[in-house]
Image: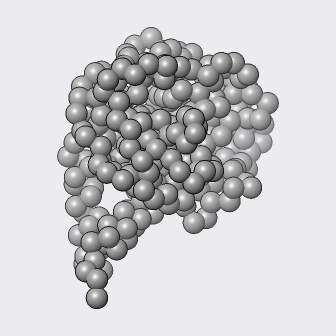
Amino acid sequence: MYLYFVFILLIFVYILSGCGEPNYEPNISRVVNGEEARPYSWPWQVSLESFFPTCGGTLIAPDWVLTAAHCITFHTYRVVLAEHDMNKEEGPEQSIMVAKMIIHPKWNDNCVSCGNDIALLKLEKSAVINDKVQLACLPQYNAAVTHNQPCYVTGWGRLYSGGPQATTLQQALLPVVDHSVCSQSDWWGSSAKTTMVCAGGESKSACHGDSGGPLNCKGRDGRWYVEGVTSFVDGRGCNTPKRPTVFTRVASFIPWISETYVMLRYSCNAPHL
């Protein structure tokens, strides 16, 4: 038990000591309905790829990526960091194979609205942290985001429902919608759980292909935190009124993230008897 808590302390001290502070500041002064992000301004954003790009993800430690459980449908994946333009080899990209995929044990792939849409990816090797590849901060356990708090979704998803896939990384301002609003019967109703975060709505939305990527929210300390993992939108379209994008609430899963890291780290380092 002592070793367990020591590992938790070490990982969070390590992560919080250097996270959420991009060298290239995001251009957030005029983003409303989405636009191309400034290159490398979201340096924890990763592209999750199998035979082709499938989802997004967030680098939370040099060898750990956070994504959505529903993204894990193939056996072999790699992540690409420092990606901006999918159609160009721009130089700083890092491509790393995924060594292990850990899906939340309560995830039900037949019921995305049941929650627990979260997964951790252990990379074969650590990413090289530099000015274009950095870590996002994790929120404290059960930390709350507030109604209308300005947060940003990022990814290479479709530019609008039925529209083309983005080739360059996009960002959009998605103000948080409080659970008391999002769970109303004419909004998401019972599909909105307390382990989820709703954000955006109408013209402001994530879209297909953004899954697994981060909902980036700036903390009072000036650092960027991954408060959500992009989970689902309304089946009628990404920009349906009163159907904001739904994210897995990362703050609800901090114990599971900690336990997973500790268990895998300890099992890998334990002496063979």
Q: Is residue 32 above or below residue 139?
A: above
Question: Is residue 264 something one can see in this rendering?
Answer: yes
Q: Residue at x 52, y 39 (%)?
A: 49
Q: Nearer the viewer, residue 92 or 145?
A: 92
Q: Residue at x 55, y 47 (%)?
A: 68
Left or right, 182 with respect to 223, comes to: right
View extreme (top): residue: 30
**In what quadrant of the picture does the C terminus appear?**
bottom left
Question: Is residue 139 something one can see in this rendering?
Answer: no
View extreme (bottom): residue: 273
Color style of the picture: one colour
Left or right, 225 with respect to 231, comes to: left
Measuring from the top left, give residue 102's x and y in whole percent. Answer: 50, 60
Measuring from the top left, give residue 89's x and y in whole percent. Answer: 40, 22
Q: Residue at x 63, y 54 (%)?
A: 115
Q: Residue at x 44, y 51 (%)?
A: 98
Measuring from the top left, give residue 55's x and y in whole percent. Answer: 55, 38
**In what quadrant of the picture does the N terminus appear?**
bottom left
Q: Nearer the viewer, residue 140 or 88?
A: 88
Q: Is residue 137 above or below residue 29?
A: below
Q: Nearer the viewer, residue 5 or 103?
A: 103
Measuring from the top left, give residue 185's x and y in whole percent. Answer: 77, 42
